[in-house]
Image: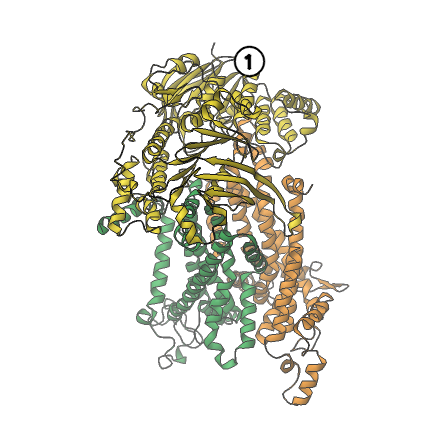
Chain colours: A yellow, B orange, C green
Amino acid sequence: MELLDIKNLQIEFPSRRGTVVAVKGVNLTVRPGEVLGVVGESGAGKSTIGNAVIGLLDPPGEMSGGEVFLKGEKINDLSSEEKRKIRGRRIGMIFQDPLTSLDPLQTIEQQLVETIELHLRLGKKKSQERAVDLLRQVGIDDPEIRIKNYPHQFSGGMRQRVVIALALCAEPEVIIADEPTTALDVSIQAQILELMRKLCREKQVGMLIITHDMGVIADITDRVAVMYQGNLVEEGTTQKILGDPDHPYTKSLISAVPRADVRLRRFPMVDYIEKEEDRKVLLDISTHWLGQGRDFGKIEGPLISVKDLVMTFVTKQAFLKKNRQSFNAVDSVSFDIKQGEVFGIVGESGSGKSTIARLIAGLYKPASGSVFFGETDLTKVGSEREMDVFRKQMQMIFQDPFSSLNGRMRVMDIVAEPIRFHKLASSNREVETIVTDLLEHVGLGRQAAVRFPHEFSGGQRQRISIARALATRPRFLICDEPTSALDVSIQAQILNLLKDLQEELGLTMLFISHDLPVIRQMCDRVGVMKKGKLVEVAETEALFTDPQASYTQELLSLMPKLDFLSHEGLDVEAS
Amino acid sequence: MQSVIVMFTVGLIAFSMFRFVGDPINNMVGQDTSEQERIELRERLGLNDPFLVQFGRFSLNAVQGDFGLSYKYRVPVSEMIAERMPATLELAFVAAILSLAIGIPLGVYTALKRHSFLSKLIMTTSLIGVSLPTFLTGIMLILFFGVVLRWLPTFGRGDVIELGSWSTGFLTASGLKSLILPSITLALFQLTLIMRLVRAEMLEVLRTDFVKFAKARGLPNRLVNFKHALKNTLVPVITITGLQLGSLIAFAIITESVFQWPGMGLLFIQAIADVDIPIMAAYLVLIAFFFVMINMIVDILYYAVDPRLRADNE
Amino acid sequence: MENTVEKSRMARILDSDIWHSFARSPVAIISSIVTLVIIFGALFAPFIAPNDPFDLVAIDLMDASLPPAWLEEGDSRFFLGTDDQGRGILSTIMYGARISLFVGFASVIFSMIVGISLGLISGYVGGRTDAIIMRIADIQLSFPAILIALLLDGVARGLVPKEMHNDVTIYVLVFAIGISGWVQYARTVRGSTLVEKNKEYVQAARIIGIRPGTILRRHILPNVMGPVMVIATIHLAIAIITEATLSFLGVGVPPTTPSLGTLIRIGNEYLFSGEWWITIFPGAALVILVLAVNLLGDWLRDALNPKLR
């Protein structure tokens, strides 16, 4: 018998612009001890499934059709009080963000004991013992002591362990995990997934895991259901879905996943998904506007040279200097970026990689050390006017497509701003011509100019960002996690675009990412950062095949294994 | 640290008022005083000393509660204020209790039952409450309960009993009766503010992940709402409520003037009409002092409620 | 080109969530109509008021203390009755609302300008500047607006010669109410600026080389105006109340140019002798005006807060 059986589930969100059907007639089953993955890109409707099963859909969402069975018992039309009794007792839930999932004002013990008491009624003493035991099971050291702590005294990964302990409190039959590792670093993600896998096996719990991440799917699931725009397009064993998908959407999705074992020339065109343009257009650089005015001063040797860079952040403000607490986000880092190369920096969150990008771009002033642009030390440039000369040659693309564009400005004005500021065009008409041309060049079309950013999707917004960065005709482009907020298929398109532009314009690039497979696709050389220090710099191929530093080896070993991913239709450059 | 700065700044303002608004000598002596006498008085009072010295002397006196003589009544300001203080504090105290005891439960109720008819009624009424100027509320209450129904006294404190230097209206029937209308008037505005604040904060907390997770753990609504949500709501509410209650004492000016309540506010309003600077200065410093005290209590409460602050100082 | 942009802007407004929320909220529509009617009546009082309360020739003491027109002894010339000097209540309300609204709007604009500038600077520059501005704000916050206004008024009385007093009071009033309100704006704008400053579009502008002044004006200011508008609406209500309160306490505008508060004060003296209309009608006008503005502010806050929907 199936443990959890979802039949013909339909979820609707009525709004004034008409009813949105988030989930259309989806069937799913979970068996004891099995992990079922539900994978899909944003807007696929996957997250609402979990909420609908436990009866906690956010209004105005409603379950408008279908049935949910738990061990053969129909649970979707129970009263809200009966549903509440199932929550936590028979179905455990794990949410995405461990930092906000726990009540900050109550100790871990209070939260564990209240849940255990509620469902199992063991008595206070027994409940406390059980709470300690649970913490030990989820791998928290010294549980007797740690249980008295408040949530803020735990790190993100530890908190997610506590959340898992809370979900396991009453020995539920099913656990629903909604993006359980998305907020965590790769190394912690691996540990949490392993823990979940183990608990699932030992306790014969069925698990429904909802994620957008193919790595998570490959790591932990037995079977996978692929969602696309509210529909279940394909379901099968993990091996089958990843290695030999049938449905064209699944195929395009799999082919867009960056992989660490091979380097592609380009990602295959994903024509199933978005209507965005992704054609390779090479301009005649000698006649095009982007090609003109590129006679920058000749630079011998590396274009960018970072020497002993240190950046200090104050962590605790105080009126007196001596009472302030601070730490070095970047700790004496040195490296060179050669002309025309793509230099990658990889590291976990808090490793200081984004800080380096901002130091080079001049957004932060370093505590010490220098950034050379050719021969000039940018940290010693005195006047704004002198600095403008370099700003023109150096632009940046940011991580978050939703905050990197000013929502109150038209796309035309956003892209024109650098051209107008640096007076790169003589008339307003010329500015407009250049902007529409740029927009077309990044695959948006000229009508985009009169619209506002909120009318575009994440990937399109990132294209606007790229157009703005190109508008000063830079020779050096800093990309700070340019695709980490995007769906995998959109990521493939943006990476393709960046590759094309780099090739076409001969750009030098600093490419920052936490994602090793993406780094492998994009970079010529890579630096690995850990806690503000650069632990290793190597050619990309060498780094992936023969890592030297132990930290690099660790990072590589913790990467999700995507070995049985289909290689169908890939344009492989090196392996 | 903050309190010291506040007191210092307010002291400086009060002193500047003393020194530069009008001529202190003119306010002390009659028309027929000769120029010679004026100069002597000036010297004797130290008005020719450097600014800092004068300010130092002022502060020293102020700390001891000495603000000089009232220009109009020729009586030490400290005595006048001490005499009036119990009336204002008793009024503010009752109003504070009223607005907290009614405001917080109403705020919680309207947040939890957001769509119920009663909540909407309360919210609309509360908007009228915010829109009613305090003095108008007072006038209405006087008109209805005092003039039309003749149930309650409309001015003064009624009979008071002296407990040492403290005169209280709590112990007599007429004192308590007299307190009813003014305290309702004073509380009404604060009550609506506190209620709306609690509601807004509570709604914010109810949207957080940990509330959703608590529900997903199967906790009954009662536990989720009162154990988890309410406690988190109170953290931000404490600060603003503290400030609001502090302003009750100053807000009492209006109520006191409508009900002819013999408190500090009435004294202050008369002082403004008379440009009686010493009283104004003393009142200002006193209000700042109350504010600083309330702020300290708020900080301590904060510390008790929020474990994140405790960990910070370890 | 210009035309199509204009058109699409209009279309954008009609399609925006704010407009839909407005069109579907009877409370918002009614209160904005009420506000507009009062503003209209006040603005054109000299043309539409049934009689001119400041024309000494037209005032007749024989008309003093007449009850409203629908009561016995009422006079059809004075729909809402007259006060102790024979001035028509309806007309004095219209003229009084002029003063109230002027003080209200002027002080709101004054505190907006001060508050927004200081808030932007505080949030964007940070460090010492921020600490100092916010400390001042904290200190000021410990004193209610009414107390600050009273103090300033008292100080002004001490500084300004008696004969000039009546002429300057209204400006003192605007300054006093305005200066007591800036903290709200500064705190909100600072908070939003701190958020916006770290958003990537501001960093992008900095990388282009745009100077801080331009960034604040062109990028940050438009993005922090939402909450400012909510505060401004509610502050308008508070400013009108504060003005009325000060006038009621006798330290506001002089009786020669009475505002709503002054009218209530004058009427209050006659309340016990049964001439209730002298107080009640101006009071009702005041409450209706403030309530309408408050309702608008309340609606605006909900409409701008997408999380509440």
Which quadrant holds residue B176?
bottom right
Q: Nearer the viewer, residue C202 or A435?
A: A435
Instruction: Give the answer, above or below, for where C31 lies relative to A6.
Output: below
| Residue that numbered label 1 is attached to | A201
User: Mark 1, chain letter?
Assistant: A
In the drawing, does residue A428 fall left or right of residue C175?
Answer: left
Rendered-image quadrant of the C terminus of chain B: top right
Q: Position of residue C261 (x, y in %)?
A: 47, 67
Q: How many marks?
A: 1
**Is C245 in front, or is B137?**
C245
Q: Amino acid at mark 1?
A: Arg
Q: Is residue C170 visible?
A: yes
| Foreground pick, A16 / A550 | A550
Residue A8 seen from this side: no
Q: Secondary structure at mark 1?
A: helix
**Left or right: B288 in relation to C43:** right
Local crowd size for mark 1, using a 10 Å CA cut-off: few (<14), some (14–19), many (≥20): some
Residue C274 drawn at (x, y percent): 49, 69
Task: Tell which residue pokes out farthest to the right in this image.
Answer: B164
Query: On the rendered structure, is C223 left or right of C125?
Result: left
How far from the left and from the top, in percent, is residue C31?
A: 38, 54
Task: Give the residue drawn at x 68%, y 73%.
Answer: B54
Residue found farthest to the front: A300
In this rendering, position of residue B102 left or right of residue A7: right
Q: Position of residue B278 (x, y in %)?
A: 65, 72
